[in-house]
Image (cartoon, rainbow, N blue to C red):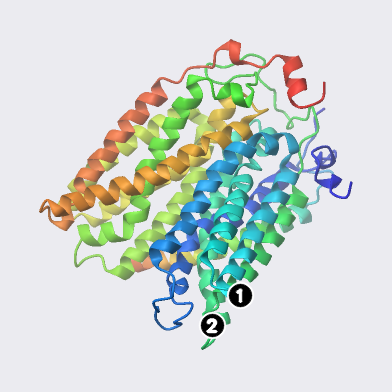
Amino acid sequence: MALSFLDKKHSIAPPGYSRWLIPPAALCVHLCIGQAYAFSVFNLPMTKLLGITQSTPDDWKLTDLGWIFSLGIFFLGVSAALLGRWVEEGGPRQAMFTAALCWSGGFVLSAIGVYIHNLWVIYFGYGILGGFGLGIGYISPVSTLIKWFPDRPGMATGMAIMGFGGGAMIASPLSVWLMSVFSTPTHIGVAKTFVVLGLIYAFFMLVGSAIVRVPAPGWKPEGYVPPKQAGKLITVNDVYVYQALKTPQFWLIWWVLCLNVTAGIGVLGQASAMSQEMFPGRVTAVAAGGFVGLLSLFNMAGRFFWASTSDLIGRKNTYFVFFVLGFVLYALVPYFGGHGNLPLFILCFLIIISMYGGGFSTVPAYLKDMFGTRYVGAIHGWLITAWSAAGVFGPVLVNYIRQYQIDSGVPKAQAYNVTMYIMAGLLVIGFIANFLIRAVDDRHHMALETVDEAVGVA
Amino acid sequence: MSSDNDGGGTTTLELALAWGFVGIPLLWGVYGTLVNALKLFQ
């Protein structure tokens, strides 16, 4: 078959293949799909596609455009959950290849949507097709990295998921530059920018797909001795993906991720306005932009730092740090805001946002510890729904509570205080959920013959 | 089976090319973000 080179069996690493080629392969995908966080740079230009210099009544509204990103994130969760098992059993090359087609195809369809000025085409292109590219691409390298780095699974997945945080840093200036290059007096340059981005992303992701390999059966790193017995919270067995969904451990980790992300995502979206309103006259719009940039850097760095740290102190302890330190920092933010202490206010949020990123990157290794390596990618896919849920909870909590405070006569500078205390409260619930996590009961483990049957080798 | 994957089949050049392929765009993005972030302190 023409596409047989995509099969798992055709991507088994030959002897001497360096495992250090796998993180760049994963980054090829994650750096591209990380563009999703930079989609907002297109929002304003897309409200002026017809009017060019200003919006006309027939131009799209910001509220309509907001659905593009929301659909993308929604279908990220849907595809990661539904296609996780297919990704796991088909191997990373097939998944990365498919993700490349969906993601770049989504951009090309969106370019057509801009060209014919039909928003539904963009909803389908970027939102649904691109969303599938996001979901498949996000989970595609996870279990492969864990299998190549059994000695440092947190660090390995941290490197890839760091790329998702870094993707927006590349996409945002690149998109602005491309639009300026393609802009003419009669066109704003969005359609051509989408086409070029689609081609660039297809190239990068296909290179990643070509590089990636799965380790040969029985391979292990030099000097690594796999544990023969399960640790307190590290299993040596595997749990089938749909069996994992029946365990309390899965749902406790679901809440751990959801609450950690909820606490961070609301702040990330409101950081610019919050810093200006809590420090009126001291933080200008330009400085607030710098604050958002700094948060992005710590979000990215935290993904690598905390996931690597989890290899040393354990996943459960890492989340304990997130919840305890996060609680203290959220509780301190109103104090520093009230006392006008800008440096400590910034420091609090930089640490908080590093732990937000760390929550994403540490969770694949947490799942591997609890459910084994065989279906960790598929189980991770289902867990991504916690992110989708948090994407709704977080911003809604921050926005509505702030508005309620302002409507109740609270000064803008203090309107975020209650939100901060509520976020701290959410982290207490996350702490409890993390505390309740115990090793998975033996009855959920796969028997050897079940393992073979599930992967079709029986 | 056990192998030292830091040598053998994969050359240093291949590793450098692979890491450069993703590292250069990432560093460019980080640099731009850092320059933007410095506005907070101006």
Nearest the camera: A87 or A125?
A125
Q: Which mark is residue A149?
A: none
Q: Residue furthest top?
A: A443
Q: CA distance from mark 1 to mark 2?
A: 10 Å
Instruction: Report the chain holding disc 1.
Output: A
- Element at label 2: loop
Decide which of A241, A21 is in the foreground and name it.
A241
Describe the element under mark 1 as helix, strand or loop.
helix
Task: Name the residue tied to disc 2.
Answer: A187
Q: Is residue A266 left or right of residue B13?
A: left
Dot 2 falls on which chain? Answer: A
Q: Position of residue A205 (x, y in %)?
A: 69, 55
- Please provide percent x and percent y for residue A42: 48, 68
Q: Are marks 1 and 2 in contact (CB under 8 Å)?
A: yes
Tell me the quarter of the picture where residue A150 sits.
Answer: top right
Query: Which label is found at residue A192?
Result: 1
Mark 1 residue crowding within 10 angstroms, few (<14) / some (14–19) / many (20+): many
Residue A339 in sight from this viewpoint: no
For badge 2, the amino acid type reads His
Give how far across and how far down residue A46 sits, in percent: 47, 72
Q: Does label 1 or label 2 sit earlier along the sequence?
A: 2
